[in-house]
Image (cartoon, helix red, strand yellow):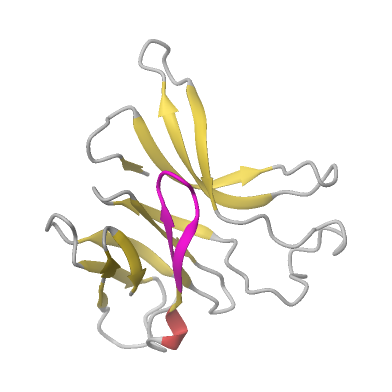
Amino acid sequence: AAFHPSDSTIVYVAPVLVHPNLCADCYYQAAARLKLNPSMNGSYTLERLYGENPPDPCECACNAACLCGHEDKYHPREIEVDALDNVYVTSAHSLDNDWVLVFSGSTGAMLTSTWLEGLTDQLRSPAAMSLSSQDPPNWLYLASSVNRNPVPFVYRFAIQRQGNAVSAL
């Protein structure tokens, strides 16, 4: 979970289980922005989902392995947010299908997605994510949960922007 940089009643969480009402037993995972209710212990309002509803799971008989030919970005694990309204989500899968997804915090639109295996074959199933402390952050740090080297590595990716929005890693 990550708190909004300027509003302590906004929290970003991943993963959340979403029931899209497509069929009785079909769900998908996403990330979410929640508004905490300070007057009621533990209550919140869902403000935004980050992540797409995968292809109609009913056509695939709710088979998690069936993605109907689409990229599998539906395994959110970690979430971070910056002061410029960008939400960073890692999507990690045991089949070495790992992504960093960046969304607009206010609209939920995906700004960019980066397939990690396209950048380095050593980073597998990212287990930890952090942004650099600059404002705005210039670096995204990821740690691998699978170490193929005798020494664990932390990977640093430059954050590229167009205005305030992230355009690439």
Residue in the picture at 85% in, 64% down: 60
The foreground one among 36 and 129 is: 36
Which quarter of the picture shows residue 124? bottom left
Position of residue 87 in the picture relative to residue 160 (left or right): right
Residue extending furthest toward the front: 163
Number of numbered discs: 0
Quarter containing the N terminus = top left
Quarter containing the C terminus = bottom left
The foreground one among 148 and 40 is: 40
The foreground one among 112 and 117 is: 112
Determine the main secondary structure of the stretch shown in magenta: strand
Residue 97 position, x and y percent, is 55, 77
Q: Is residue 57 above or below residue 150?
A: above
Q: Is residue 102 magenta?
A: yes
Residue 140 position, x and y percent, is 26, 67
Q: Is residue 58 magenta?
A: no
Residue extending furthest toward the left: 134
Residue 2 position, x and y percent, is 33, 44
Position of residue 20 in the picture relative to residue 37 (left or right): right
Which quarter of the picture shows residue 114? bottom left
Residue in the picture at 44% in, 44% down: 13
Residue in the picture at 47% in, 57% down: 77
The residue segment tinted magenta is: 101-113
Residue in the picture at 41% in, 52% down: 104
